[in-house]
Image (spheres, coloured by chain):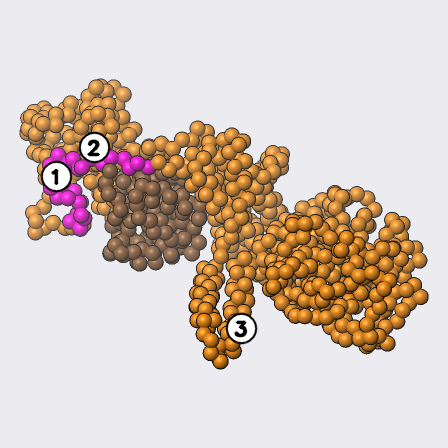
Chain colours: A brown, B orange
């Protein structure tokens, strides 16, 4: 087991339910979790975080700034543009995934997700 | 079921309630003509969030319905469906069904399947013209079990890269059916620039492949092709220049390899083929891969030794995979990063059986859900914390002063106690603020009540809500729901006329009910105002007489007639209607309001409508009381019901022929009630009113006034209400008890009951005074 104490994960979702599930699963797995309730807050949390998170997990449908907007904003910033971003999505339609890809998402996690799948997805991009 | 599951489920249900409110708000706005993108998006998001959460808990009914709802909303969002009146109606109905499904999921009443199906069908008509609705069943597999690696294996659209082998061999793409499955699998992987730009790393993918090999009890042979690596001075950090060839054990399935590359299928070239890969220890030259594979032209192709003619230049070299800006290690021979053991993740978040499982568990969930929790503005908690801090300081200074014995200490002590009192009051207010909630949550539910009442009564009534931000104690908010529901149903059923009658009376066809809340002098005032025909007083009186509620010869004021509708057993509906004929009358509503320490009054203008006014205390825990002496004991009269206090001379009192005493205050006569005898603390026979009597003029919610004779007024103080019923039993004339500063128990008088008993006796309907406390 690797030490994950220092691995920070930023999760951005407007649903408190999803947020608490993410937090529980990630903390259980030893990650350090930062959370934002929408794209705007997600970006704020990203700026505040020192060191920056190793992964960003974001929902797509959110008020103020949606997931696509968040991804695009992150990819534009030199300091953060290489952070892997995973999108959480219930939509199984390829169109959404394609849009997320175009925006610069690294991968996706399909809701409902299991803790194992979540952690596996993070490992996949932080190994 | 784990505790954490329960906890998360609670959060989910709380979120559902919030999302449903959001949905209601959104649909109301839509109904009001706000068809902008933001509004529709907010509506969509609310349903979407509920669906997302529900899916995580395996609440299938909820997910299935939410999904169909969402699909319709998506049609609305994309403009394929216009938000017409009819469409909004369907959406509102769907919202009600969704809300019921949430309740069902909480463990509440089940939902009528026919209703769900009906709503579902009408929703489907909205998006019917589009492609066949995708099956919601697919969203949660029936046997949904969390698996270690459940990325949906979306088939990668492989672009078989055409390869031209110089050797004339007919290349075949991918390991086809004909491939010998015993042969090792060879994967070539050439990442594009975009792969790195998306925050991914070739290393991650190689590790993914290596893990596959490990799962298959084998090893992966990973070789890096550095042939395109430019000289150091020409290296462009952001330009990828490496590609890899990986040989995996034969037992590794191709699907699992596709899964590894799922996320990057569009930003790299991959080929998968079966062939006798070189053994791991072969090094470069000895291996004679016989690929039936295709390779990207710029990848390993030139080095591949097909017929043993060209010695491959593929060397197990450093994995300079990622552009220089990456932190990937530069030195790995046979890229074999440290083994990563799966983390001991034991939370089983998505285990649906836990929720939809046995009944016993469902019951447990229900119990949990009922556990109340509130969301509190952090600022309010901070304020409370500040005050508590001050309290600690105040206590310390009080102790210091208490230990001093000089001349000033007494005065200082009084001063400190005074500031302590202010502080306590502030803390009490702060705690109340923490418990306070806007009435909006109840008011919003009323939209549905009116909607349903309308469809049953075949009327069209708009509910207008005002002051939904008014805050009131949480317990009150919850307890308001039932009385308000009943009153609004009544207003629709009896208050607002049928559309034809309205048109005949020159009114708009659509009726209007105004539900408003506001603060007034430390109480909350809720009004329900309809623009109907008003109360038919002649008819009310006729019925009341017929039912024996009033004597045929009684003369009643208009107010008193209106108030007859609160009498037990009174109902003006000529037939038992769907709405109001459920055995609950306005008397129950009144009792409920009184039980909350509230008052209810009614005004009605014929032809214009009826207004009900509810006045409620802000909290149920504390009340401002006037401490009075009655027959040597201290009693509490709620200040809110005291109109004035005065000293009256005996000459202003008049004894009526029937023995009752009335008093004239500034020309207004009202009955006089001697509390000591009324409550049975003193024999009525031997009692005579003193020459100068201390009098409290009290008023009940009906506006009727009575003068109470007491011995003395001691003080005015806040008292904490202790239920009599809970600790002893209900006593007529007494609403509750409290404990005074000296530790003694004191009774809080039920003023409305006292007033009612007096006025009823005046009507000759109640012969006995309220039963004695002394008994």
Labels 2 and 1 positioned on one and the same chain: yes
Q: Looking at the image, is mark 3 or mark 1 nearer the viewer?
A: 3
Q: Chain of mark 3?
A: B
Is the C-beta separation of discs 3 and 2 under 8 Å? no
Q: Chain of mark 2?
A: B
Quarter of the figure that contains the N terminus of chain B: top left
Is residue B261 in the magenta section? no
Q: Is B223 in front, or is B444?
A: B444
Q: Position of residue B409 (x, y in %)?
A: 48, 77
Is residue B323 in the magenta section? yes
Q: Say what secondary structure mark 2 lies in.
A: helix
Tell me which segment is drawn in magenta: B318-345
Q: Quadrant of residue A93?
A: top left
What is the CA distance from the residue labelled 3 to the residue labelled 2? 76 Å
Q: Chain of mark 1?
A: B
What is the CA distance from the residue labelled 3 to the residue labelled 1? 77 Å
Q: Position of residue B178 (x, y in %)?
A: 25, 19
Q: Say what secondary structure mark 1 lies in.
A: loop
Labels 3 and 1 positioned on one and the same chain: yes
Decide: few, some or many residues near mark 2? Use Cα within 10 Å; few <14, some 14-19, many ≥20: many
Residue found 69% across the figure and 59% down from its top: B747
Q: Is B46 in front, or is A32?
A: A32
How would you classify the magenta stretch by its main secondary structure?
Answer: loop
The residue wearing badge 1 is B332
Q: Position of residue B654 (x, y in %)?
A: 88, 71
The residue wearing badge 2 is B210
């Amino acid at each position: 087991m690797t030490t994950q104490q220092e691995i920070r994960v930023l999760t951005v979702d407007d649903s408190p339910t999803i947020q608490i599930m993410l937090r529980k699963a990630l903390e259980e797995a030893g990650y350090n979790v930062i959370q934002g309730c929408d794209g705007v807050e997600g970006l704020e949390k990203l700026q505040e975080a020192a060191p920056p998170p190793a992964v960003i997990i974001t929902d797509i449908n959110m008020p103020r700034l949606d997931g696509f907007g968040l991804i695009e904003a992150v990819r534009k910033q030199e300091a953060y543009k290489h952070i892997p971003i995973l999108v959480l999505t219930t939509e199984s339609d390829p169109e959404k995934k394609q849009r997320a890809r175009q925006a610069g998402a690294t991968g996706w996690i399909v809701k409902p997700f299991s803790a194992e799948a979540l952690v596996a997805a993070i490992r996949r991009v932080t190994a | 079921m784990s505790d954490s599951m329960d906890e998360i489920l609670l959060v989910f249900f709380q979120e559902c309630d919030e999302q449903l409110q959001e949905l209601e708000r959104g649909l109301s706005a839509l109904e009001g003509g706000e068809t902008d993108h933001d509004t529709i998006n907010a509506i969509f998001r609310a349903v979407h969030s509920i669906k997302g959460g529900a899916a995580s808990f395996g609440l299938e009914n909820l997910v299935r319905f939410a999904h169909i709802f969402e699909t319709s909303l998506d049609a609305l969002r994309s403009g394929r469906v216009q938000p017409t009146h009819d469409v909004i109606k369907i959406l509102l109905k769907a919202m009600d069904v969704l809300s019921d499904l949430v309740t069902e999921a909480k463990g509440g009443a089940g939902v009528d399947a026919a209703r769900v199906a009906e709503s579902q069908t009408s929703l489907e008509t909205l998006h019917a013209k589009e492609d066949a609705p995708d099956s919601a069943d697919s969203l949660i597999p029936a046997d949904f079990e969390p698996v270690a690696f459940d990325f949906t294996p979306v088939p990668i659209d492989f672009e078989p890269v055409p390869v031209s082998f110089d050797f004339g061999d007919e290349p075949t793409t991918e390991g086809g059916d004909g491939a010998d499955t015993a042969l090792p699998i060879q994967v070539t992987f050439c990442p594009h620039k975009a792969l790195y730009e998306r925050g991914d790393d070739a290393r991650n993918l190689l590790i993914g492949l290596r893990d596959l090999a490990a799962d298959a009890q084998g090893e992966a042979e990973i070789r890096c092709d550095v042939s395109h690596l430019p000289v150091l001075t020409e290296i462009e950090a952001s330009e990828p220049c490496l590609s890899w060839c990986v040989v995996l054990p034969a037992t590794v399935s191709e699907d699992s390899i596709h899964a590894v590359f799922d996320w990057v299928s569009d930003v790299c070239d991959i080929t998968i083929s079966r062939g006798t890969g070189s053994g791991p220890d072969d090094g470069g030259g000895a291996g004679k891969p016989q690929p039936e594979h295709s390779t990207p032209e710029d990848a390993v192709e030139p080095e591949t030794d097909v017929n043993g003619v060209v010695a491959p230049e593929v060397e197990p070299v450093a994995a300079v995979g990622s552009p220089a800006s990456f932190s990937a290690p530069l030195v790995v021979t046979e890229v074999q990063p440290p083994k990563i053991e799966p983390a001991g993740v034991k939370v089983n978040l998505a285990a649906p059986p836990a929720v939809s499982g046995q009944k016993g568990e469902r019951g447990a969930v229900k119990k949990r859900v009922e556990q109340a929790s509130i969301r509190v503005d952090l600022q309010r908690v901070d304020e409370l914390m500040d005050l508590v801090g001050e309290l600690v300081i105040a206590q310390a200074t009080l102790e210091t002063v208490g230990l001093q014995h000089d001349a000033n200490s007494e005065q200082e002590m009084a001063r400190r106690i005074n500031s302590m009192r202010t502080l306590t009051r502030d803390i009490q207010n702060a705690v109340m603020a923490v418990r306070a909630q806007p009435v909006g949550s109840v008011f919003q539910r009323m939209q549905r009540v009116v909607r349903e009442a309308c469809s049953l009564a075949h009327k069209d009534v708009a509910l207008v809500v005002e002051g939904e931000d008014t805050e009131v104690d949480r317990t009150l908010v919850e307890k308001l729901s039932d009385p308000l529901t009943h009153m609004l149903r009544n207003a629709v059923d009896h208050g607002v006329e049928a559309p034809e009658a309205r048109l005949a009376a020159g009114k708009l066809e659509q009726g209007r009910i105004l539900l408003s809340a506001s603060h007034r002098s430390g109480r909350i005032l809720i009004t329900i105002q309809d623009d109907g025909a008003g109360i038919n007083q002649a008819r009310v009186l006729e019925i009341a007489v017929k039912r024996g509620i009033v004597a045929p010869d009684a003369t009643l004021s208009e107010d008193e007639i209106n108030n007859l509708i609160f009498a037990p057993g009174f109902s003006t509906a000529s037939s038992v209607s769907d709405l109001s004929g459920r055995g609950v009358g306005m008397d129950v509503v009144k009792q409920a309001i009184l039980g909350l320490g509230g008052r209810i009054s009614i005004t009605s203008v014929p032809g214009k409508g009826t207004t009900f006014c509810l006045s409620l205390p802000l909290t149920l825990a504390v009340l401002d009381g006037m401490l009075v002496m009655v027959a040597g004991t201290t009693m509490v009269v709620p200040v809110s019901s005291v109109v004035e206090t005065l000293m009256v001379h005996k000459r202003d009192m008049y004894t009526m022929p029937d023995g009752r005493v009335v008093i004239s205050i500034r020309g207004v006569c009202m009955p006089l009630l001697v509390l000591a005898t009324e409550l049975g603390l003193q024999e009525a026979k031997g009692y005579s009113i003193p020459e100068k009597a201390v009098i409290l003029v009290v008023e009940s919610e009906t506006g009727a006034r009575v003068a109470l004779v007491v011995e003395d007024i001691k003080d005015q103080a806040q008292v904490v209400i202790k239920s009599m019923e809970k600790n002893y039993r209900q006593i007529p004339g007494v609403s509750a008890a409290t404990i005074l500063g000296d530790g003694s128990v004191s009774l809080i008088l039920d003023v409305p009951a006292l007033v009612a008993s007096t006025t009823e006796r005046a009507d000759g309907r109640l012969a006995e005074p309220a039963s004695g406390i002394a008994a």
